[in-house]
Amino acid sequence: MYLKNAVKHFIVITKHRWVVFKLCCRVGEPWRGFVHDLSKYSPTEFFESVKYFNGKHSPITDCKKDKGYSEAWLHHKAHNKHHIDYWVDLSASNKTPIIPYPYVAEMLCDKLAAGIIYKGKEWTKEYELQYWLHERDKALVNPQIEKLITDFLTQISIDGIKKVVTKKNVKGLYKKYCIDYKIENNILENEIKNLN
């Protein structure tokens, strides 16, 4: 059973990474797609995930139900900047800063890929928006990033992946919700240089 789950989990995370890579290429961030979730192959994440693997959703969910926490998740969010949890610092004055563009682009691709892989043939273009609307109230996230994610997933639910997952569109959303916000609030640093 353990070896079978190990093989199945390896296949799931590798398929997930492949879908993220393809989507990241569409938004102009192939490197982020290439290095996406490499920590899932680390012993801390891999072995716990194998133990709780069922193929229907993230093993982390079942581990949290069983143990009350997940070492794999604690390790994962600390090593992957595309997760909103990576950017939370409760002791800082800005507890949830605006996440830099490359990681936002990767995060959006990750959200889509997770649903596509775990839902399989049952995945619909509306799925991720419904999932996000259910989960976002539990998330500590910068309000501008929350608006960006909601807008992006709403667009997906209406127009689908091909029309929405483009470099022009995702950069436009980032500009609208993050860059313009920083300009209006005089908190712009070097993001404009880094966005080009």
Image (cartoon, grey):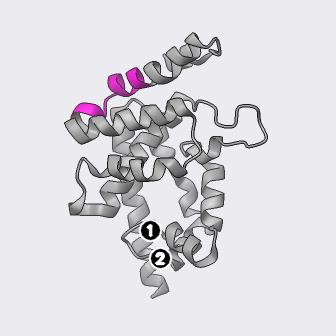
Which residue is at the far bottom?
1
Q: Give the residue pinned by disc 2.
A: 6
The answer to which of 191 and 95 lies nearer the viewer is 95
Structural crowding at the residue carrying mark 2, measured as other residues with C-alpha within 10 Å and reported as few (<14), some (14–19) or many (≥20): some
Residue 148: horizontal and vertical position, in percent? 43, 31
Labels 1 & 2 near each other (Cβ < 8 A): yes
The magenta stretch spans residue 29: no
Q: Is residue 111 visible?
A: yes
Q: In this view, does 57 lie above or below 138?
A: below
Q: In this view, does 121 lie above or below 179?
A: below
**Residue positioned 64% across, 68% down in the render:** 69
Which residue type does callout 1 highlight? Answer: Phe
Which residue type does callout 2 highlight? Answer: Ala
Q: In this view, does 70 lie above or below 3?
A: above
Disc 2 is placed on an element classified as helix
**Residue positioned 64% across, 32% down in the render:** 97
User: From mark 1 to mark 2, how far is it between C-alphas?
Assistant: 6 Å
Q: Give the residue pinned by disc 1.
A: 10
Structural crowding at the residue carrying mark 1, measured as other residues with C-alpha within 10 Å and reported as few (<14), some (14–19) or many (≥20): some
Residue 29: horizontal and vertical position, in percent? 44, 33
Residue range of the region highlighted in magenta in the rendering:
163-173
Residue 15: horizontal and vertical position, in percent? 36, 58
Corner quadrant of residue 42: bottom right
Corner quadrant of residue 38: bottom right
Residue 175: horizontal and vertical position, in percent? 46, 19
Which residue is at the far front?
137
Which numbered disc covers residue 95? Answer: none
